[in-house]
Amino acid sequence: MIVSSERLLGPGGAFEPGWVRVDTDRGVITEVGTGEAPDPVDAKGPYVVPGLVDIHCHGGAGASFATTDPDEARTALALHRRHGTTSVVASLVTAAPDDLLRQVETLVPLAREGEIAGVHLEGPWLSPLHRGAHDPELLRPPTRDEIEALLRAAEGHLRMVTIAPELPGALEAITLLREAGVTVAVGHTDCDADGLREAVRAGAGVVTHLCNAMRPIHHRDPGPIPAALAEPELTVELIVDGVHVHPDVVTLLQRGARARVALVTDAMAAAGCPDGAYQLGGLAVSVVDGVARLEDSDALAGSTLTLDRAVRTAHAAGVPLVDAVVAATLTPARALGLDRGALVPGAPADLLVLGEDLVPTSIWREGKLLT
């Protein structure tokens, strides 16, 4: 199969006329070329880009990844695949120790089968001062025993853990997790600039939804945000839905971090659903005009975003389209060591045809047409 476009995002990181040859039996890309395709084309469109990669997603279609029912997790996964996200890391919010273990164990078979790209723990090792939509009664410092129990339960599929580095034992936990091959993200934190840098020295490689649920910038107390932008190896997540981060700040951060920005959804169960009442980690959430907030406060409770909309919203804010697409494909994949996110020979054949409106019209995952 050959897919072509006048604006294909090729290995060089620019849109140009080109084509991709896919071995549909093996589900891999075998050739990528520029100019006119050498053989008849099976599909074409205004844009051809890699499948989107979401490394921070809690659910969608009324379903959550924080479940003991694998079919519920598959329901959430299907919603995001319909919007062009071919790789999803399933995120779990803070829960009691036994509940969290059961949720991880539920997701392991899906990770083993390649349905999800792994598990992300957003909690329970977070700051009560910046807890967001996490149950304050369940927040706790990290311990070696709990970390080792979760690592055993995940069977090698724990991809990322968000942690507040100022908590007791957090720096030791970061080192322990990195030694186990887990990417550590700094988030939901009251750390200052020096605390962020200490976390990076201990092994942290990502910042969870930069600007949200952390100490803000002050000209005499800069906090973790400028420090994160100054760390050349640090990937920074952004939730670009027009709510979590103002468009002017999105473009400012993108200019500061460029290829280190990873667009994420932080989507909860209400993604793809009407306004109404929902749950996130046992907390009541109200969705009004597509914005999810805790019922008993003004705190944002994740988003109702899909990653294709994040790309469009970032581009509308002024982010160059190539940068917006890379931020939703190659950058998050690299941050977690995933073999996806680029149209290169040997890579899984995850690719999208986008219309002029940047809405996916055709979606392939490992060479199989999803829509």
Image (spheres, rainbow, N blue to C red):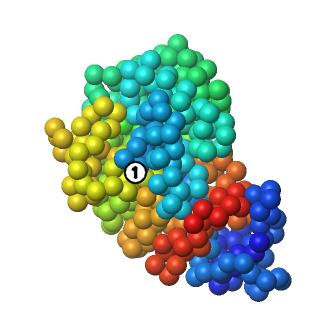
Residue lying at the far left of the rendered structure: 296
Percent of width and height locating residue 182: 60, 33
Residue sticking out furthest to the top: 145
Q: Is the residue 65 above or below the residue 60 in the image?
A: above
Name the residue beneath numbered marker 1: 61
Q: Nearer the viewer, residue 157 or 243?
A: 157
User: Image quarter for residue 4?
Assistant: bottom right
In the rendered structure, the answer to whether residue 32 lies left or right of residue 297 reads: right
**Label 1, residues with CA under 10 Å away: few <14, some 14-19, many ≥20:** many
| Quadrant in the rendering for residue 224 | top left
Quadrant of image for the N terminus = bottom right
Across and down, in percent, residue 25 comes to: 80, 59
Quarter of the rendering containing residue 126: top left
User: Quick one: 295 or 228, which is closer to the camera?
Assistant: 295
Q: Nearer the viewer, residue 176 or 231?
A: 176
Q: Is residue 153 above or below residue 285?
A: above
The amino acid pointed to by label 1 is Ala
Closer to the camera in the image, 61 or 307: 61
Q: Give how far across and how far down residue 355 sits, in percent.
A: 52, 78
Q: Is residue 141 visible?
A: yes
Give the residue displayed 58% in from the left and 70% down from the top: 362
Residue at coordinates 67% horizontally, 54% vertically from top-left? 340
Residue 299 visible within the image: no
**Residue at the location (81% across, 69% down)?**
31
